[in-house]
């Protein structure tokens, strides 16, 4: 990565376990794309309502090659899938990983086209000529 990871904790105790998990996920992203420009991660507790329990919010801003920005923002839910911070981190980084993979496929011209799309594209080019 060209710039070091920016990790911010807001209203959440900074723990080495969470920091290590985030660092591990960022290293895995670097195996997909070794030219990531920057990555900012914010872990916060947005509301302090006692009846809601521990809700967390995670925001990941990743700048990929050709100034392609990937932004993922997720929040824990009481009855949903994201009931723990570690689960929220894993799922959020999985979304970033899929988006980064798709961006890298596009950069490498590895995007599949269907025969119908090829015919439509060639017909459109013939009309322009």
Image (tube, rainbow, N blue to C red):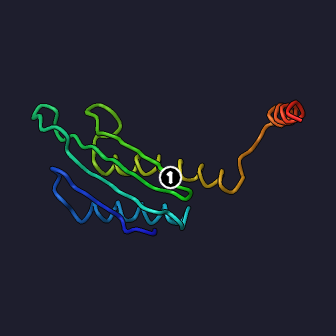
Quarter of the picture containing the C terminus is top right
* Nearest the eye: 87 or 100: 100
Q: Dot 1, crowdedness within 10 Å: few (<14), some or many (≥20)? A: many
The image quadrant that residue 45 belongs to is top left
Quick one: SS at disc 1? helix
Residue 126 lies, in percent from the top left, at: 90, 34
Residue 84 lies, in percent from the top left, at: 27, 45
Residue 71 lies, with reference to residue 30, above or below; the image says above
Residue 111 lies, in percent from the top left, at: 71, 47
Return the residue found at the far left.
50
* Nearest the eye: 83 or 25: 25
Q: Which residue is at a point 54% across and 67% down the rendered structure image?
A: 34
Residue 6 lies, with reference to residue 50, above or below; the image says below
Which residue, given by chain and number where applicable, does mark 1 sit on?
97
The image quadrant that residue 114 belongs to is top right
The number of numbered discs placed on residues in the rendered structure image is 1
Q: Which residue is at a point 43% across and 54% down the rendered structure image?
A: 62
Q: Which residue is at a point 26% across and 63% down the rendered structure image?
A: 17
Q: Is residue 110 left or right of residue 121?
A: left
């Amino acid at each position: 990565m060209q710039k070091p990871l920016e990790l911010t904790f807001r209203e959440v105790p900074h723990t080495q376990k969470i920091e290590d998990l985030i660092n591990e996920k960022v290293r895995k992203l670097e195996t997909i794309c070794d030219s990531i420009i920057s990555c900012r991660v914010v872990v916060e507790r947005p509301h302090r309502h006692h009846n809601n329990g521990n809700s967390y919010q995670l925001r990941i801003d990743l700048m990929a090659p050709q100034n392609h920005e990937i932004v993922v923002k997720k929040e824990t839910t009481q009855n949903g899938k994201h009931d723990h911070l570690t689960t929220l981190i894993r799922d959020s980084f999985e979304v970033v990983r899929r988006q980064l993979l798709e961006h890298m496929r596009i950069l490498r011209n590895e995007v599949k086209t269907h025969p119908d799309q090829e015919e439509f594209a060639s017909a459109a080019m013939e009309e322009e000529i």
